[in-house]
Image: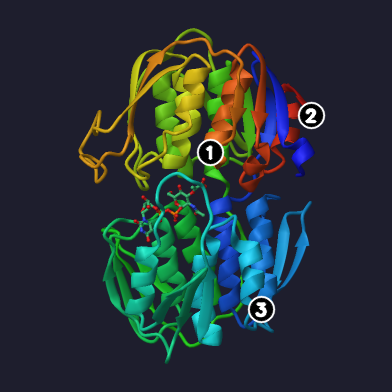
Amino acid sequence: MDAMTDLLYVHGGTPLQGEITVRGAKNFVSKAMVASLLGETPSELRNVPQIRDVGVVTGLLELHGVRVDADAEAGTLRLDPTDVESAHVADIDAHAGSSRIPILFCGPLLHRLGEAFIPDLGGCRIGDRPINYHLDILRQFGAVVDKRAGGIHIRAPRRLQGTKIALPYPSVGATEQLLLTAVRAEGITELANAAIEPEIMDLINVLQKMGAIISVDTDRVIRIEGVDRLVGYQHTALADRIEAASWASAALATGGDIVVRGATQPEMTTFLNTFRKVGGEFAIDDEGIRFSHPGGELRSIVLETDVHPGFMTDWQQPLVVALTQATGLSIVHETVYENRFGFTDALRGMGATIQVYKECLGGRPCRFGQRNFSHSAVISGPTPLAAADIEVPDLRGGFSHLIAALAAKGTSQVRGISLIDRGYERFTEKLVALGAEFDRD
Ligand code: EPU
């Protein structure tokens, strides 16, 4: 999307009503694409959404000699890693600025080429987002990590060796880093305190199809027996439960009724419970989930974000917009990212009553307590929202602003909407399908 179309004039106040479709999960598809590097034969991934992150990973894979054939309409990707080679550092830099995925290329590239270069990482500005766990994991496998200006050079002096690791925190990316590295390392790897998000489980499905041996124990310990070779996979990506929940929150905030085709229940159980407690209604069938505002008052809640099976941090921002319309005081304690309430500034500017606190409110203490991070929010409602000029801060915060603008009476200017393309497929087309009123510049 070019600068001309980076601004939307949103005429809010109309309930969103209609039907849209979500496809594969952004936070799975990108990792499955990286996994294709580990195979000796081509892979095929289905249910791939047309989002910018897929384009970024496609670019990075192509730079490393992977042939990527995409049928965007059908949502299929064919990934042929037969001729993988080293990429040019400057080119990687040009591709990577907008994503954190490059760090996950390390394990596969170390196995294939013996070395990897990872440029400084992008991604949403929602906290420090360090990569210390990733680098510690790679070192434990025997890789040598060398930080240089502009990026990190990593090499494997010999075949990577299986290892035993306990994560200080169940990081999604670090768990994926370990999986993508351990499957072809020599011997057994054991990861304690692993993350077990559904997207990780689907990555394990993919790796098992490729020939990996991976078990997940009930106590969140993952065990991998390294193998000598892996082959390509054929796989249909699980649905994007973050996008589905975002539209659900949009239905609630605007008093609407949205059928999200493709949304699936098992990965959304925790969200659905919360949605019902707030007063939203949903109906599930084989095609998807219908989310609606039944009319009348919404209820305030106490909510804490957490790793799976807890309430996802990525569900938090869109739901907070709906909570501005609930009666009473809602408390939201963000325990995954230390800095994910920046987006509430704009909501306050639109008339919401939201205060953020450094204390751990509403539940158990988390690792951000006593550390000067504004990571708890108290939302007092219901407050009508008024149109405003907004600048999109990050992917989920940006979508939340869009929801707020759609709920607010009057015309809002929402700038920087191209950021939303990173993770929401053709969202302006979906808004049209839902009866939203907006103009482009
Ligand atoms: N962390 C560290 N050190 C590390 C890695 C993580 O301290 O080396 C900390 C982070 O700073 C954060 C926490 O661990 O406080 C959790 O981070 P995690 O590694 O789990 O997140 P991630 O893998 O970087 C993925 C998603 C995020 C999603 C989180 C949590 C992708 C590409 N991104 O990030 O999605 O919020 O897991 O579920 O999969 C989004 O889609 O908008 C998004 C931000």
Locate residue 415 relative to residue 108 in the image: left or right: right
Q: Residue 441 carries which label?
A: 2
Q: Name the residue under label 3.
A: 81
In the image, what residue type sits under mark 1? Arg
Q: Mark 1 points at which residue?
A: 396
Q: Which residue is drawn at 66% across and 78% down?
A: 81
Viewer can see residue 126: yes
At which x and y percent is residue 171?
Answer: 37, 56
Locate residue 201 relative to residue 434 in the image: left or right: left
Between 406 and 343, the one nearer to me in the picture: 343
Q: Which mark is residue 220?
A: none
Q: Which of marks 1 and 3 precedes in the sequence?
A: 3
Q: Which of marks 2 and 1 precedes in the sequence?
A: 1
At which x and y percent is residue 428?
Answer: 73, 34
Residue sitting at the far top: 296
Compute the Cα span from label 2 to label 3.
Answer: 42 Å
Give the quadrant of residue 135: bottom left
Between 265 and 388, the one nearer to me in the picture: 388
- For disc 1, does the CB lie below 8 Å from ligand 1? yes
Between 197 and 177, the one nearer to me in the picture: 177
In the image, what residue type sits under mark 3? Pro
At which x and y percent is residue 29?
Answer: 59, 58
